[in-house]
Structure formats: C-alpha cells, structure tokens
Amino acid sequence: MTRISTFSLLLMFLMVISFQSMALNNNYTIGAGDRIQISVYGEDNLSIDDLYIDNSGTFEYPYLGQLNPLGKTVEQLKNTIINGLKGDYLISPKVRVSIIGFRSIYVNGEVKKPGGYEYQPGLTVDKAIALAGGFTDRAARNKVYIGQSGKDDLKNKAKLSSAVSPGDIIVIEQSFF
C-alpha cells in the first residue's frame, strides 16, 4: 500500500470516528452514571474537571446553585450555564461541557462474566458480549434482547450488530438444548 492511500484511509477513519462522536454528543442526553467536565475559559473557580452525575441528578454550581442536567443534552446544559453566568457574573462567558465518561451498560444471562461494563462509542451487542467474556455453552444466540434501565416492560429482540446505548441492558437467554 502506498503512503498516500494509507494516509487517505487513516484520514477517512478519523473522520468517521469524529462524526460518530459529534452525533452522539449532539443527541445524547445526560443521565445518572455519566461523568462530565465543565470548563469556563479564564475562570478556574467555575470549571469542574470531573463531575459524576448521581441518581439525584443535581449538583451544586458556583453562583448558580443547584443544577439538574438529567435529560439535557451537552448543548442545553452549556446554554443553561452561559445564561446563568452572563450579565451579573461574566460579560461573555465561554463555556464547554463535555462527556468524559458514559454510564455503564449491563450484560446479563448466558455470558461468561455477566455484569456492568463501561460504555464506549460505537459499541454493538456482539462487542458487549465479547466484553462479558463471550457466550456460555448454554446461550441461545438467537434470543438476545436489549432493554433500557428503568423500563422493564420494554425489551427489544436484538441482532448481534445492533447498536448499544449507555445504560442499556443486554440479556442473553438460555437455549433448551
């Protein structure tokens, strides 16, 4: 392979990853278990390097008091902080909010190591099963379901190539034979 074609492939790969990341961050809503970072340019006392969002969903932010990021996109939380700081505290605040850690996904049922695993962008069912050590000998490979945390009644049959979202619960059923 020539240098130019190798460079072109690498460039295309990086573009795909960055577009996936941008799409995830634009539509992704913050939930309990996520870790975020808040940076306010030139204002170290207003920046938070690593903030874990717990089940209460609220955190104390300087000058603004209690903020609740649950169900908000990164952009919505950023705008809330900008609007709160603008005027009384800062003339034109420059704020960046980033997801630095996603809530876990869970793999249960007929896998070798059931449990919670850190979500990674681009995660699919087959990759999540691999994280959990693979199928057991008794796994029904055609009976794989994805559910969402807090929604017990909503289980969708999934293909191994199906995308997984943060907080999803993957269940692999047992085969009869």
Image: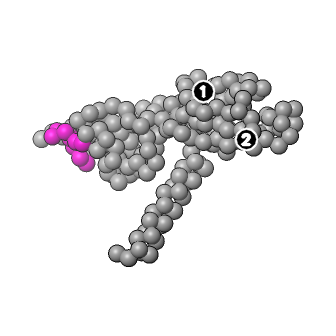
Q: Nearer the viewer, residue 54 or 89?
A: 89
Q: Find the magenta span and give its range.
A: 134-142
The answer to whether residue 55 is left or right of residue 39 is: left
Which residue is tagged 1? Answer: 57
Task: Residue 120: give x, y in percent of width and height.
Answer: 44, 44
Q: Say above or below: 142 vs 13.
A: above
- Residue 135 belongs to the span the image colors magenta: yes
Q: Secondary structure at mark 2?
A: loop
Task: Residue 69: give x, y in percent of width and height.
Answer: 64, 33
Q: Nearer the viewer, residue 156 or 38?
A: 38
**In the image, what residue occupies the spot 15% across and 40% down?**
137
- Residue 88 belongs to the span the image colors magenta: no
**Can the viewer see residue 145?**
no
Q: Residues within 10 Å of mark 1 (few under 14, many from 20)?
A: some
Q: Quadrant of residue 67?
A: top right
The answer to whether residue 153 is left or right of residue 95 is: left
Query: Which three-letter amino acid code belongs to the residue tagged 1?
Result: Gly
Q: Secondary structure at mark 1?
A: loop
Q: Nearer the viewer, residue 95 or 76?
A: 95
Q: Earlier in the sequence, mark 1 or mark 2?
A: 2
Q: Quadrant of the N terminus?
A: bottom left
Q: Residues within 10 Å of mark 2 (few under 14, many from 20)?
A: few
The answer to whether residue 160 is left or right of residue 22 is: left
Q: CA distance from mark 1 to mark 2?
A: 25 Å
Q: Are marks 1 and 2 in contact (CB under 8 Å)?
A: no
Q: Quadrant of the C terminus?
A: top left
Query: Which three-letter amino acid code belongs to the residue tagged 2?
Result: Tyr
The answer to whether residue 42 is left or right of residue 59 is: right
**In the image, what residue occupies the spot 71% across and 33% down?**
44
Which residue is tagged 2? Answer: 41
**Can the viewer see residue 100?**
yes
**In the image, what residue occupies the spot 54% across and 24% down?**
55
